Image (spheres, rainbow, N blue to C red):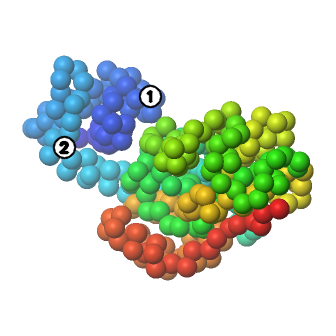
Amino acid sequence: MKLQQLRYLVAVHENGLNITAAARQLHTSQPGVSRQLKLLEDELGFQLFERKGRALTRTTAAGEEIIGRAASILREMQNIRRTSAELRKADGGSLSIATTHTQARYVLPPVIGEFRAKYPKVRLHLHQGTSEQIADMVARDRVDFAIATGSAELFPQLVRLPVYHWHRAVVVPRGHPLAAAGKLTLKKLAEYPIVTYVFSFSGRSSLPALFEAAGLSLDVALTARDSDVIKTYVRVGLGVGILAGLAVDPVADADLVRLDAQHLFEGHTTWIGFRRGALLRTYMYDFIERLAPHLPRRLVRDAERLDGEEELQRLWRSLAVPSRERAAG
């Protein structure tokens, strides 16, 4: 049995039994992955997967158990490497974060500035993307932390902890009819084209569903990943912007009117997550606490030992999670 075979096994599992995708992730060939899986099954004496032709159709019960143990072995290997690095160079290392544009642009700068001042030898890597792209980076074990909103189903392998609550806001150019239309309603919004975030590809997006439930049609003129891009196209008159309220800066966006929409849209929670069983170095705990002071190292360590999503949700409900909102106007 080789560690390479275990890597291939776990990669195939994480890629939904798609050998081609696993091979791409591992930078190797599809036949090579198939061959190593077959050699591993021959050595173990039982099948890890059921097959239909060359395609894997499902994981066997024995396969599920072996995959769990293999994933644990690979995590421990990574932990050993990190322990070695920490013992050799306690004040240095790296921290890789995958997050969205909104977090990278409007939330993380002061946190990273303080962190960098304390840990100048830590190499920081910031990767931006959609929830699906962040999940892909997590699946490929490319990042230490993921910072995102919602999409819990994309991150079953992470310990996720709440950072702050927020609401969507509506922005229009000054002089726009909605700026003087009184209390905002979905019906009023539906009269105009909308510029908003890219909808999720993994499930039903909440914004279209909200309008449909009210019997209204949502006219989407443009979707974008970037809050600043959304505001740019609002400025040129493409439509009414719906975006995170914290992404509307009262100084930089003084030419726009931010309309209160908390009564229209449900709140959201941004979280930070890391792999179960991962070895977090001291500066990683420090980063979490700087981002979310209600998540001290002791609490994060307790969360690491929780068994499953249900216990994690109970912890979420026990925390006093702050809100990040800006006033309308």
Please state the horizontal and vertical placement of residue 40, each as a whole percent of the image.
20, 35
Of 174 and 129, the residue lying toward us: 174
Point out the tag, 1 or 2, that comes first from the N-terminus: 1
Q: Residue furthest left?
A: 45
Please state the horizontal and vertical placement of residue 157, each as a whole percent of the image.
39, 54
Q: Which residue is mark 2?
A: 63
Please state the horizontal and vertical placement of residue 59, each as a whole percent of the image.
20, 39
Count of picture labels? 2
Mark 2, secondary structure of its residue:
helix
* Above/below status of 178 relative to 269: above
Q: Amino acid at mark 1?
A: Arg
Q: Which residue is mark 1?
A: 24
Residue 13 falls in image quadrant: top left
Q: Is residue 1 left or right of residue 204?
A: left
Q: What residue is at 57 percent from the left and 74 percent from the top?
A: 321
Q: What residue is at 33 percent from the left and 36 percent from the top?
A: 16
Of 46 and 58, the residue lying toward us: 58
